[in-house]
Image (tube, rainbow, N blue to C red):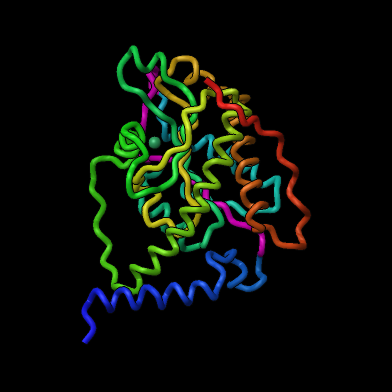
Amino acid sequence: MLSRRHHRAALFWLVCACLWLTPVLPPPMALAGARDARPLIVIDAGHGGDRLGAVSADGVAEKDLALTLARRLRRELLRHPVRVLMTREADIHLELEERIELANRVRADAFVSIHLNAMPGARLSRRTRGVETYFLARWASGARAQKVADVENGSESAPLREVDDLAFILDDLMETAAHREASRLAHGVHAHLVAELGARDRGVHQAPFRVLRGARVPAILVEVGFLTHPRESRLMRTAAYQRKIAASMARGIVEFLAAGDRFPQDTKRPHRAGPVASEPRS
Ligand SMILES: [Zn+2]
């Protein structure tokens, strides 16, 4: 009789063989018929309701600015042949898991969670500004990445999912494919933000974010700037800077979709995105 370990290994190879014969993560409409073949983006405004997120010295909450930016990003994206779904449109509480579950359920082509960063302490907060972009990993890529994940995850611990062997293996493989794509999405969006905002480049990192956990679609979390930095905080409240944030994120997302052949053949090609500076900034 096969031991549980052998049984699991056999299942693993069986699933690998099946997946090898089928394209990994096909565009959602390839399976659903030709109802609407435009790629679907899920935009998630961080926090909401009683979860304020970070708060600036003069009382502006992350949840409100994140929603404003999410709306602006939607407007920018809708200039292209894509569909957009928002996890929230108002100041409501949503569990972190609900957000990514929505993206999984609609088989989104990309999930983008918008946040604003914070640095505690008067001295550090005056010095710390810039853009950080994250995608999910089991382990953080550094102490700072883990700290950001801890803040965004909140104090609750996530319940363990009960899954059987096959579901576990399938999840694992789907998540691996989504993880590779998420890395590409994260680097693309980040490069556009840094280049077009002229913001400080604080890098692309990996960390175990609860809002990204279980993602079976390419999912990223963007910290577009620091609410605790006096100048950056003021800048992020101006309509001009908000439009720049939204436009540069949209260009990164559209490039990701085009490079992954996620636009249907019969739609006109998306607008060419602007150039991206590749030199690191200090
Ligand atoms: Zn946040």
Give the percent coordinates (x, y) of residue 234: 50, 18
In the rendered image, residue 180 lying in the magenta stretch gets the answer no
User: Residue 115, image x and y in percent?
Assistant: 44, 36
Tell me which corner region of the image, top left, top right, bottom left or bottom right, holds residue 230.
top left
Which quarter of the figure is the N terminus placed in?
bottom left
Point out the quarter of the image occupied by ligand 1. Answer: top left
Residue lying farthest to the bottom in this orientation: 1
Q: Position of residue 275 (x, y in %)?
A: 70, 34
Q: Is residue 11 left or right of residue 260?
A: left
Please name the predominant secondary structure of the magenta segment in the image: loop
Percent x, y of residue 272? 75, 42
* Residue at x 30% of width, y 17% of height: 121
Rendered view: 105 above or below 209: below
Where are the magenta residues, as a range?
Answer: 37-59
Query: In the depicted view, which residue is nearer to us: 86 or 183?
Result: 183
Residue 50 can be seen in this image = no
- State whether residue 221 appears in this view: yes
**Quarter occupied by residue 38:** bottom right
Tell me which residue sits at (42%, 54%) in the image: 100
Q: Nearer the viewer, residue 256 or 231?
A: 256
